[in-house]
């Protein structure tokens, strides 16, 4: 799972898009693209309550509770 804030000033949008594409490619080559998830938030640099909730939901879905 990749999470990113679209207005984070630490990395440029092209850098973030490239990294996200690389992860998707790795999952695809492994034959498990359905397990890849990209969550994109329309905010600046932060890690708020939505982000760990989304991450734990993804982990529960693929690793079990």
Image (spheres, rainbow, N blue to C red):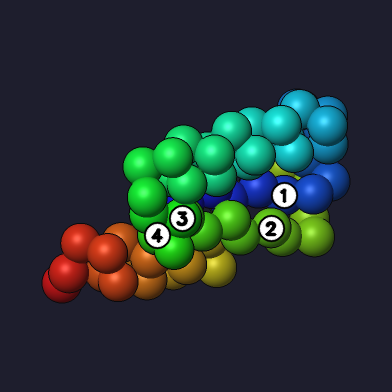
| Crowd rating for badge 3 (residues with CA inside 10 Å; few <14, some 14–19, many 20+) | some
Residue bearing the label numbered 1: 5
Mark 2–mark 1 distance (CA, rounded to whole Å): 6 Å
Mark 1–mark 4 distance (CA, rounded to whole Å): 21 Å
Secondary structure of residue under mark 4:
helix
| Crowd rating for badge 1 (residues with CA inside 10 Å; few <14, some 14–19, many 20+) | some
Q: Which of 20 and 53 is in front in this view?
A: 20
For the residues labelled 3 and 4, say whether their Cβ atoms are less than 8 Å apart: yes
Quadrant where the C terminus is found in the figure: bottom left
- Left or right of 31? Residue 48 is right
> In the image, residue 43 lies at what x, y percent?
78, 55
Lower position in the chain sequence, tag 3 or tag 1: 1
Residue bearing the label numbered 2: 40
Lower position in the chain sequence, tag 1 or tag 4: 1
Residue at left offset 58%, top offset 56%: 38
Mark 2–mark 4 distance (CA, rounded to whole Å): 16 Å
Residue at left offset 83%, top offset 32%: 14
| Crowd rating for badge 4 (residues with CA inside 10 Å; few <14, some 14–19, many 20+) | few
Residue at left offset 72%, top offset 49%: 5
Secondary structure of residue under mark 1:
strand
Secondary structure of residue under mark 3:
helix
Residue bearing the label numbered 4: 35
For the residues labelled 1 and 4, say whether their Cβ atoms are less than 8 Å apart: no
Lower position in the chain sequence, tag 2 or tag 4: 4
- Left or right of 14? Residue 18 is left
Q: How many labels does the image show?
A: 4
Quadrant for residue 53, please give it.
bottom left
Residue bearing the label numbered 3: 33
> In the image, residue 55 lies at what x, y percent?
42, 60
| Crowd rating for badge 2 (residues with CA inside 10 Å; few <14, some 14–19, many 20+) | few
Lower position in the chain sequence, tag 2 or tag 3: 3
């Amino acid at each position: 799972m990749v999470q990113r804030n679209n207005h984070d000033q630490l990395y440029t949008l092209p850098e973030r898009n490239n990294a996200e594409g690389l992860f998707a490619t790795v999952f695809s080559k492994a034959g498990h693209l359905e397990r890849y998830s990209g969550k994109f938030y329309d905010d600046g640099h932060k890690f708020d309550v939505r982000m760990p909730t989304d991450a734990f939901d993804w982990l529960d879905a693929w690793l079990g509770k």
